[in-house]
Image: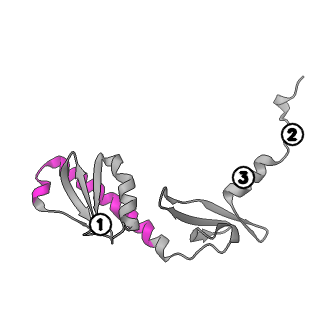
Amino acid sequence: MKMSLYQSELLRKLSAHDCSAQFDEETGLLHISYQDHPVCAQNAQGILRYESEWHEDEDIRDCYQAIEDEVAVIREYVKLYERSPQMPFPSIKEYRMLGEMGDVVFGAKHSENFGFTFPLGIRTRNTNRLLSETIAEIMKAPRKPLPFEQDS
């Protein structure tokens, strides 16, 4: 069994909570620990479960609460990503379109190595381009020195 998007995203974020995890390929569970004490396990759908005796220590309960908050955010953007269509622009088909407002397009891309990235795109005069492509083009344009940069 392979880790789900929910599990791989949580695994990336656990170090911020001083936690570690091990994925059990047989059961499909991501087992999460804090200072070598079990905190919880996450299934492929992103649901957390735990044994009540694991949470007798206040530090473990606090850690679980932080992980639970993290999981709620992850669940929100992974569901949005999974339900979103591919970008209709040929140069960025690997991105999904999360939403748009005016000339701004919000996108997301998932990579097994780096997790999620959330770039912005812009539309100008019936063309669709990534914001980074537009910025790169601006940076390559010839520049005139600013008045204070000129020799007197």
Residue 85 percent location from the top left of the image: 56, 77
Earlier residue among tags 3 and 2 = 3
Residue 135, numbered label: 3
- The residue type indicated by label 2 comes to Lys
Chosen colour scheme: one colour
Mark pair 3, 1: CA separation: 43 Å
**In this figure, which residue is indicated by the disc labeled 2?**
144
Q: Nearer the viewer, mark 1 or mark 2?
A: 1
Q: Position of residue 133 (x, y in %)?
A: 71, 57
Sequence-wise, the earlier of marks 3 and 1 is: 1
Callouts 1 and 2 close, C-beta under 8 Å? no
Residue furthest toward the right?
152
Q: Nearer the viewer, mark 3 or mark 2?
A: 3
Instruction: Give whichever of 132, 145 is nearer the camera.
Output: 132
Front-lying residue, 102 or 13:
13
Q: Nearer the viewer, residue 43 or 146?
A: 43
Toward the viewer: 127 or 21? 21
Q: Nearer the viewer, mark 3 or mark 1?
A: 1
- Res 139 label: none
Q: Secondary structure at mark 3?
A: helix
Residue 68 lies in magenta, yes or no? yes
Mark 3 in CB contact with mark 2 (< 8 angstroms): no
Residue sitting at x 61%, y 60%: 120
* Left or right: residue 80 compared with residue 56: right
Q: Which residue is mark 1?
A: 25
Question: Judging from the image, what secondary structure is the residue with disc 2 in?
Answer: loop
Mark 1: which amino acid? Glu
Q: Position of residue 36 (x, y in %)?
A: 20, 47
Q: Quadrant of residue 70?
A: bottom left
Q: Residues within 10 Å of mark 3 (few under 14, many from 20)?
A: few
Helix, strand or loop for the magenta stretch, by majority:
helix
Mark found first going from the N terminus, 1 or 2: 1
